[in-house]
Amino acid sequence: MSSKKLVFSGVQPTGNLHLGNYLGAIKNFVSLQNDMNCVYCVVDLHAITTFQNPDELKNNILETTASFLATGLDPNKSIIFNQSSVSAHSELAWIFNCVSKVGWLNRMTQFKDKAGSDKEKASVGLYIYPNLMAADILLYKATHVPVGADQKQHLELTRDIAQKFNKDFNCKDFFPLPEPLILKNISRVMSLRDGTKKMSKSEESDYSRINLKDSSDEIVKKIKKAKSDSEPIPDNIKSLEKKPEALNLLTIYSEVSKTNLEKALIEMAGKEYSYIKGKLADLLVAEISPIGKEIVKLMNDKTHLTKILKKGSEKASIKAEENLKNIREKVGLI
């Protein structure tokens, strides 16, 4: 790899990637690969912190890979692989388990959210998940990580681990302190059924989200049924913020139409919801439907997808093993 900035990002293969994943992360991966060295990982080890049906997991790993390719990621420009195929991730995670502090992990709010009220039943893997995430990033000495609001805390922990390792083993600047790559004009995409909740594949109703594999008819139907009210679209941001469902539709519209929220609001102010829903559905059909068709096409040739992952893991392993050899030496392992 050249001396260009290096980006690392991972996506969990839990099935049903949706519009929120696309606008908040995957779409931006494509533009980044033109300007930086990029490592994009299907983080299957993170997925098993909660139980996954083995057959479904295998399929989801390939489907996530297909989604990467369908949205424009190029395996000739970016390294695309699945995490478990490069064992250095697990080895470095253990080393970081011995560097990181229990107090640091106790402050991780995402564990509290995912574990729920009965933490005793959560897996140890879910608790130490942030240390594996740090290993994913630092194994390649990534300089930048695209992050959303729910991952900022984990990146801060990664920086803490890097600093502590560098200090503990007297190797100043060995690990870089990765910077968050916060892309402008990217807002959280919320549920189509409840504008106060983040769009999620775990929400029971399929009408709460636009899946990347949805057909044109399904996209139109879901947008048409999106929660709204009888009042027209307001004409100012302050009033819009009091209407979470309207704000969500305007946010999605502005991002897909490549404009800002203020301009979108000027265009839609005073209009009925049926107007914005019609315009939004047309935009989403044009952008998402071709991706869905390409995912289905790619999934019909799983051998091809497996080969892409294998080639990607070979490229990733070269960089990973080179760095891990130096890490072992720093720690004193033979």
Image (spheres, rainbow, N blue to C red):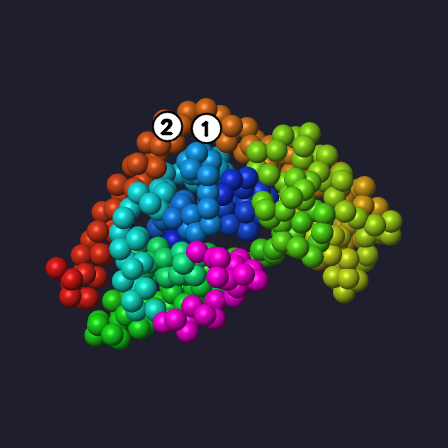
Query: At x 54% / y 61%, what residue is drawn?
Result: 118
Q: Position of residue 17 (x, y in %)?
A: 54, 41
Q: Residue furthest right?
A: 230
Q: Residues within 10 Å of mark 1 (few under 14, many from 20)?
A: many
Residue numbers of the magenta segment: 101-123
- Quarter that holds the C terminus: bottom left
Element carrying mark 2: helix
Side of 105 where 268 appears, left or right: right
Residue 119 lies in the magenta stretch: yes
Kind of residue at badge 1: Leu
Q: Nearer the viewer, residue 176 or 268?
A: 176
Residue bearing the label numbered 2: 304
Residue 79 at least partly seen: no
Answer above or below: position of 145 versus 42. below
The dominant secondary structure in magenta is helix
The disc, 1 or 2, on the residue closer to the chain's N-terminal end is: 1
Residue 115 lies in the magenta stretch: yes
Q: Residue furthest left?
A: 334
Q: Tell me the tag on residue 137.
A: none
Query: At x 72% / y 47%, what residue is drawn?
Result: 193
Q: Position of residue 191 (x, y in %)?
A: 67, 49
Kind of residue at badge 2: His
Q: Position of residue 208 (x, y in %)?
A: 67, 44
Query: Alpha carbon of mark 1 to alpha carbon of mark 2: how far?
Result: 8 Å
Side of 116 where 46 appears, left or right: left
Number of marks drawn: 2
Q: Residues within 10 Å of mark 2 (few under 14, many from 20)?
A: some
Q: Tell me the tag on residue 298.
A: 1
- The reply to whether callout 1 and callout 2 are in contact (CB within 8 Å) is yes
Q: Nearer the viewer, residue 53 or 96?
A: 53
